[in-house]
Image (cartoon, helix red, strand yellow):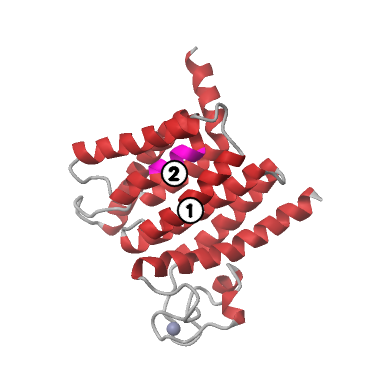
């Protein structure tokens, strides 16, 4: 039974991941997320059912549009795959529970903001405002131990990022600051700070790799959202294990 449900969670994640790509690309441009249907952004050919199977269509078409052969970025397939894997792993870890809803909401938010931040260097307010009440409700139904650690985490997450933004004079976007409020609600104080630390490490490695690959100047801004999202998902599942390991190392 567990295997069946894990597999179904994977399928659900793949399908939703495909939809989240559309949401992440269209919401910042104030476009409808249902109309028009998905189309090639180069030749505008509408995609039919065969083109819309998550991951497989991309592999089948070798990452090119069927008509105009323009290359499609592998980022979208990677996002579908990540959503699927994270959804399945959540079910595997949490089973059918209220916490599973929190996990799926949290993953959904992080996937969408990653797509938007990569495409437009922007974490849309609309997305944050849509997920905030849902995730807050989830955390009320499935509270942290103690419950107020959510509120403290949100305040410290928001406050710390705001402080960094002020000190670095705009080195941190408004979206990143608000995102950390929601991360705080989900993860609590310690794990929110761990997420910030991990995101900084991931962001540092990512910028070194990207700058080297594209031979860009150090002034080129690199979105921080994807690093935050990756760090937050790692900490959501393994934060307590990481902290335990860290404590054993020193005490
Ligand atoms: Zn095309």
List x then y, in percent, for residue 31.
Answer: 39, 74
**Residue 233 visible at all:** yes
Nearest the eye: 244 or 106: 106
Q: Which residue is mark 1?
A: 131
User: What predominant SS class does the magenta segment belong to?
Assistant: helix
Q: Which residue is mark 2?
A: 182
**Residue 191 visible at all:** no
Q: In the image, what residue occupies the spot 41% across and 86% down?
A: 43
Q: Secondary structure beneath disc 1?
A: helix
Magenta stretch contains residue 95: no
List x then y, in percent, for residue 17.
Answer: 55, 62
Magenta stretch contains residue 183: yes
Please give left or right for residue 84 compared with residue 170 in the image: right
The picture quadrant where one finds residue 83 is bottom right
Q: Quadrant of ligand 1?
A: bottom left
List x then y, in percent, for residue 163.
Answer: 25, 35
Q: Is residue 208 above or below residue 155?
A: below
Establish whether ligand 1 lies closer than 8 Å to the Cβ of label 1. no
Nearest the eye: 213 or 100: 100
**For the magenta stretch, what is the residue range?**
180-186
Q: Are marks 2 and 1 in contact (CB under 8 Å)?
A: yes
Residue 16's label in the rendered image is none
Q: Secondary structure beneath disc 2?
A: helix
């Amino acid at each position: 039974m567990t295997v069946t449900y894990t597999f179904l969670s994977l399928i659900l994640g793949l399908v939703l991941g495909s939809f989240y790509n559309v949401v992440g690309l269209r919401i910042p441009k104030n476009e409808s997320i249902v109309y028009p249907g998905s189309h090639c952004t180069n030749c505008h050919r509408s995609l039919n059912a065969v083109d819309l199977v998550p991951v497989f269509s991309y592999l089948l078409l070798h990452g090119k549009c069927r008509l105009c052969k323009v290359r499609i970025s592998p980022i979208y397939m990677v996002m579908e795959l990540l959503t699927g894997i994270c959804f399945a792993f959540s079910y595997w870890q949490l089973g059918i529970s209220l916490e599973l809803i929190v996990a799926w909401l949290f993953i959904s938010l992080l996937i969408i903001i990653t797509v938007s931040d990569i495409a437009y260097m922007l974490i849309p307010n609309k997305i944050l405002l849509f997920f905030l009440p849902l995730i807050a409700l989830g955390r009320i139904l499935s509270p942290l131990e103690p419950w107020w650690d959510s509120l403290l985490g949100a305040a410290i997450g928001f406050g710390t990022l705001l402080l960094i933004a002020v000190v670095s004079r705009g080195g941190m976007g408004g979206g990143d600051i608000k995102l950390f409020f929601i991360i705080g609600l989900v993860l609590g104080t310690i794990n929110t700070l761990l997420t910030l630390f991990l995101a900084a490490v991931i962001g540092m490695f990512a910028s070194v790799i990207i700058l080297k690959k594209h031979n860009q100047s150090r002034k080129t801004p690199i979105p921080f959202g994807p690093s935050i999202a990756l760090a937050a998902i790692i900490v959501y599942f393994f934060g307590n294990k990481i902290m335990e390991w860290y404590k054993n190392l020193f005490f």
